[in-house]
Image: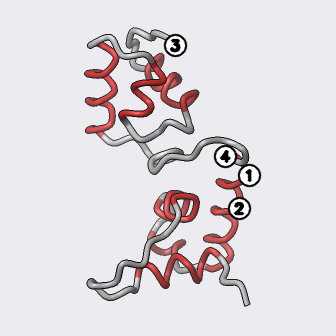
Amino acid sequence: MTKDAYEQFWEWASKPPESDLSIRASIYNPVMQLSLEDQQDRRKVNEAVSRWQERYAGHKVDIYDGAEWTEMDIDDLKASLTNGSTIEEAAGFLCRSGDVEEVERKARELGLPIRMM
């Protein structure tokens, strides 16, 4: 029987420290966007993963695609773009290479210089 996203996430999250069990970014990213309470809800976890997978179907997926922006992410984006990187290079540096449009949107929101490949 195939495990749903909820089971896969909690199997990974509950693994012993010495385990090398990993989890796909397409499960980790959307679940980590949920509140701790919602992470306990099978329906909400599976819906979040399904929406994320639909959004990125057919795209290259990176570890932080779809993740919330942290202060460190914004600092890194600013540094990357002000030092001459293209938006695609900045997205790769931020591990958001499957979500270049979101990186560009954030750069525009911050008034940063944008160079395209």
- Considering only order in the chain, which callout, 4 or 2, is on the residue closer to the N terminus? 2
Task: Say which mark, if any, is on residue 56.
Answer: 4
Contact (Cβ within 8 Å) of mark 2 with mark 1: yes
Cα distance between the residues tagged 4 and 1: 6 Å
Q: Earlier in the sequence, mark 3 or mark 4?
A: 4
Instruction: Give the residue displayed 43% in from the left and 20% down from the top.
Output: 107
Which residue in the structure is indicated by mark 3?
A: 117
| Residue 86: quarter of image | top left
In front: mark 3 or mark 2? Answer: 3
- Going from N to C along the chain, the mark reached first, 1 or 3, is 1
Which disc, if any, is residue 54? 1
Task: For marks 3 and 4, give the one nearer the viewer.
Answer: 3
Callout 4–callout 1 Cβ contact below 8 Å: yes
Name the residue type under label 2: Ser
Expressed as whole percent of the image width and height from the top left, the position of residue 89 reads 42, 24
**Dots 3 and 4: beta carbons under 8 Å?**
no
- Residue at image mark 2: 50
Q: Amino acid type of disc 3?
A: Met
Marks 2 and 1 sit apart, C-alpha to C-alpha, by 6 Å
